[in-house]
Image: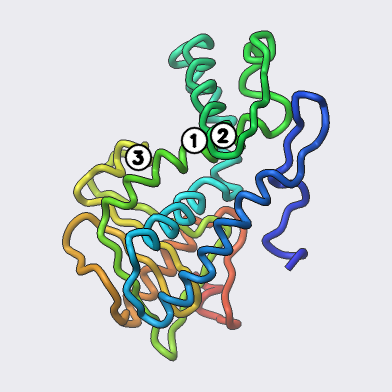
């Protein structure tokens, strides 16, 4: 596992005292993943999820949108564009909101000075992108809860694949890349493979919540979306010439 899907010090950041913190964010995600592991067992047994179950799974899914390499690699680019668009002072105000989010969620208070804030977007290593991970995920969380969820089981012959950016979202009415507001559109569709046997589909309309079985073509369509959204890597439980071709 340390050779694939792994990056050393990925969630580390430099504290105000100049020390590298490697545990705080890892511990936070460990708690989420421990709860999610139990939920995965319930899903595979097709048990009914409680509202608390939905909240815990929604939090996990929300971070699958933001904690992946593609999201973090885009943050610096987006930040630079945002600064050019609204100006440095307004961008600093927005970044302070992100810092408030990680302070609330993690108890982290980086205490970044006004002089350091003027150096946006490069702030003490990864503090800037880590703050955005939490801010965007917490913003996405309630929007995901407002959608209907269906868990589609794969067939014996056709399995789901995953990637280093497995959450795929699409809206036919959106123009270009989806900004956060487009998660409110009526035609939003989100897919996320949870394992080789099960994928989560979330939509506002035209979907029946609960469990179901996916036809081979549906599985292939979801796999194609997963591959499209991937940054560098696609993962499969079996060797597949068709996947290599895709």
Circle 3 residues within 10 Å: few <14, some 14–19, many ≥20: few
Residue 158 image point, x, y percent: 43, 84
In primary-sequence order, the first of circles 2 and 3 is 2
Viewport quadrant of the N terminus: bottom right
Circle 2 residues within 10 Å: few <14, some 14–19, many ≥20: many
Q: Nearer the viewer, residue 216 or 67?
A: 67
Label disc, if present, on residue 176 of the rendered structure: 3
Q: Could you tell me if the residues under marks 2 and 1 are in contact, i.e. CB atoms within 8 Å?
A: yes
Q: Residue furthest bottom?
A: 156
Q: Could you tell me if the residues under marks 2 and 3 are in contact, i.e. CB atoms within 8 Å?
A: no
Q: Secondary structure at mark 3?
A: loop
Q: Is residue 190 left or right of residue 184?
A: right
Label disc, if present, on residue 102 of the rendered structure: 2
Q: Nearer the viewer, residue 231 or 160?
A: 160
Q: Is residue 50 left or right of residue 131?
A: left
Q: Nearer the viewer, residue 177 or 108?
A: 108
Query: Which residue corresponds to mark 1?
Result: 135
Above or below residue 80? Residue 209 is below
In primary-sequence order, the first of circles 2 and 1 is 2
Q: CA distance from mark 2 to mark 3?
A: 29 Å
Above or below residue 159? Residue 190 is above
Q: CA distance from mark 3 to mark 1?
A: 22 Å
């Amino acid at each position: 596992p340390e050779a694939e899907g792994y990056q050393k010090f990925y969630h580390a950041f430099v504290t105000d005292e100049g020390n590298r913190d490697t545990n705080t964010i890892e511990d936070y995600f460990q708690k989420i993943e421990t709860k999610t592991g139990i939920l995965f067992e319930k899903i595979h047994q097709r048990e009914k999820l409680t509202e608390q179950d939905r909240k815990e799974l929604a939090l996990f899914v929300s971070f699958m949108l933001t904690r992946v390499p593609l999201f973090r690699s885009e943050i610096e680019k987006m930040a630079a564009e945002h600064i050019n668009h609204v100006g440095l002072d307004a961008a600093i105000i927005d970044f302070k909101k992100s810092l408030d989010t990680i302070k609330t969620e993690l108890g982290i208070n980086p205490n970044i000075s006004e002089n350091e804030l003027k150096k946006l977007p490069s702030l003490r290593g990864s503090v800037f992108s880590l703050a955005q991970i939490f801010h965007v995920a917490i913003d996405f969380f309630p929007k995901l809860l407002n959608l209907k969820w269906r868990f589609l089981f794969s067939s014996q012959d056709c399995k789901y694949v995953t990637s280093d950016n497995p959450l795929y979202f699409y809206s036919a009415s959106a123009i270009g890349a989806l900004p956060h507001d487009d998660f409110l559109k009526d035609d939003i569709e989100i897919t996320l493979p949870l394992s080789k046997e099960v994928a989560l589909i979330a939509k506002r309309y035209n979907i029946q919540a609960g469990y179901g079985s996916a036809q081979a073509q549906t599985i292939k369509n979801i796999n194609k979306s997963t591959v499209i959204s991937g940054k560098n890597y696609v993962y499969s439980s079996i060797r597949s010439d068709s996947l290599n071709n895709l």
